[in-house]
Image (cartoon, rainbow, N blue to C red):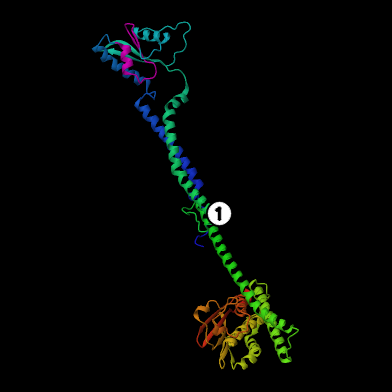
Amino acid sequence: MASTAAPRYLPWYSSFYWRIALSFVVFVVVVLIGQSVMVSYMARSGGGLAPGNPNGLATAIAADLGPALAREPNLDLTAYLRRNYPAVRQPLFLLMTDGRLAASSAQPLRDDIRRQVQAALAGATAQAAHGDSPTGPVVTAPVQVGRELRGMVVLPPPPPRGILADVGELLSLPGTLVLITATAIAAIVIFAPARNRLRALEQAAERLCAGHLDARAPERGRDEIARVARAFNRMAEDLAARTDALQVSDRLRRQMLADISHELRTPLTSMRGYLDTLDMPDLRLDEDKRRRYLDTVRCETRRLERIVTDLLDLARYENRVASLDARIFAIERVFTSVVRRHEREAALSGIDIRTHVAESADQLTADPDRMEQAISNLVANAVRHTPTGGTIDLEATASGDAYRLSVIDSGAGIAPGHIAHVFERFYKIDASRAAGTGGSGLGLSIVKAIVERHGGTIAVTSRPGRTEFVITLPQSASANL
C-alpha cells in the first residue's frame, strides 16, 4: 500500500483536540487583554464611558471657571456647564458665594450638601439638620478669581451601585463587539479548515459507497482527522485490491470451468459416438473393429480419469489440504523411478533419458512421493514434445542455500509469448508443441502447485533445441510444510 500505518499515539501538539483547547485559551486571553486595554485607555482619557478621577475633574472645572468669571462676571453658569462639560455623566454643580446655583443637569442638589458647601464658603462649620442622611464623599474644588474665592464646584457622590455596575457599563458594548469579532475569527481560523477536511472525507466516503473505488481522502496533517483519512484510504485501497482479486478470480474460475467443460466434452463425445455405434442392432461389426472401438472407449475413459484425478490433486495442493511427508531422501532414487516409468514410451520415440546428481545435492529434505510426481509430470511433458532421437536430462545441483532440480529436453522449444502461461490450467500452446499430446492439460499446473507447497519456485527457459524447467527448493524445505 502507498500509505503507511499511523502511530498509535499522537504527540499532544499534533492532536486536533489539543489545538481546539489551546485556541480557546488563546481566544479568551486575547479578549481579556483587549478589554483591559480598552478600560485602561478610557480611564486615562476620562471619556464619557469612564468615571475618571473626580478630584481632578472638579479641580480642572474650577480652574477653567476662574478665568471665565474674570472675563465675564455675569456669565450664565448653568449654560456654561452644560455647554462645556456634556461628557460628564454625574451631576455637576456650581455654588457661588453670592448664592447663585448652577447645575449641569436637572437633578437638584441635596439640601444637606448645599448647607455644607455654603458653610465652607462662609468659613463656618455646617450644622446637621434633623432627618439628614449620610452624604458620602462629596468632591469640591474652589473657584477663585484672582485671589478671591467666588464659589465652589461640587460633585455629589454617585448613587451606590457596586463595582460590577461600573465594569458592566465600561465593558457592555465594547466587550460585546470584541467577543463577536474574536468568535468569528476563531470560527474561521480554527474550525473552518477542520470542517473542510471533514467534508472532503465525507465526500470521499460517499464516492466510495457509490462504487468509485479510486476515491481517496486528503491526508494533510498529523492529527486525528488525518489519521482517519489515512485509515479510510487504506480501507479503500484494500477494497479496490480485493475487488480486483475477486474479478480476476471470477474470470479465472469462468475460464477454468469453460476449459474443464471442453476437456471433458471431447472424450465424452468420442465415447458416446463409439458406444452408440456398438449399440446399433442393424450394424454388423467384425471382431477386430469391435475390439478397436472398445479400446478407444477404454482409452477415453482413462483420459477422463486422469483429468478428474489431476483436478482433484491440483485443488488439494492449491488449498493446502494435501498432506506432505517431508523427510530426507536421495534424489537419485527419485530420478531412477521416473526414468523407469517413462523408459518404454521414450524408447518407442527413440529418446534418451539421462540423469546427473551432484554430490552436494544428493540428499534433499522434501516429500519424495510428491517430488517424484512433479518430476514425472515434467518428464512426461518433455517426452511428448521431444522429437525422435532427442534427449532428456535430469539434473540435481546445489546453489547457495537452495537445491536446483532441472528437466532439460532437446525439443523445438516454446515460443516467448507462451512462456508466461505454460503453468496455467489447460493452456494451449501452438500446434507444433500440442499436436498429438495425450496429457490432461493440468500437469504443469500440478508441478507448480507441488513446488510452491514445498516453499520453492519453478521457472522455465526455452529456445529452439533446448527447453529447461528448473525447480528451486530451499534446503530447509521442511520448515515451510
Image location (x, y in percent) of residue 322: 68, 74
Q: Quadrant of the C terminus?
A: bottom right
In the image, residue 202 lies at what x, y percent?
52, 50
Question: Can you say whether 147 is above or below 234 in the image?
Answer: above
Percent of width and height locating residue 340: 65, 90
257 or 412, nearer to the observer: 257
Tell me if mark 1 has few (under 14), some (14-19) or many (20+) residues whose alpha carbon lies within 10 angstroms of its own: few
**Residue 107 place in picture, x, y as percent:** 40, 12
| Image point (61%, 76%), residue name | 449
Left or right: 119 with respect to 422? Answer: left
Task: Looking at this view, name the residue that lies furthest to the right.
Answer: 281
Considering the numbered disc 1 on the image, is that residue within a helix, a strand or a loop?
Answer: helix
189 magenta-colored: no
Task: Specify the quadrant of the image occupied by residue 173.
Answer: top left
- Numbered range of the magenta stretch: 76-102
Q: Is residue 96 magenta?
A: yes
Examine the rendered structure and indicate whether residue 140 appears above or below residue 30. Answer: above
Name the residue rendered at 71%, 90% in the picture: 289
Judging depth in this view, the residue of 210 and 145 nearest the camera is 210
Say left or right for 170 vs 476.
left
Q: Nearer the viewer, residue 105 or 466?
A: 466
Q: Is residue 325 visible?
A: no
**Residue 335 falls in which quadrant of the image?**
bottom right
Per the image, the residue denoted by label 1 is 209
122 in relation to 344, above or below: above
Q: Nearer the viewer, residue 18 or 344?
A: 344
Q: Residue furthest left?
A: 71
Q: Amino acid at mark 1?
A: Cys
Q: Is residue 461 visible?
A: yes
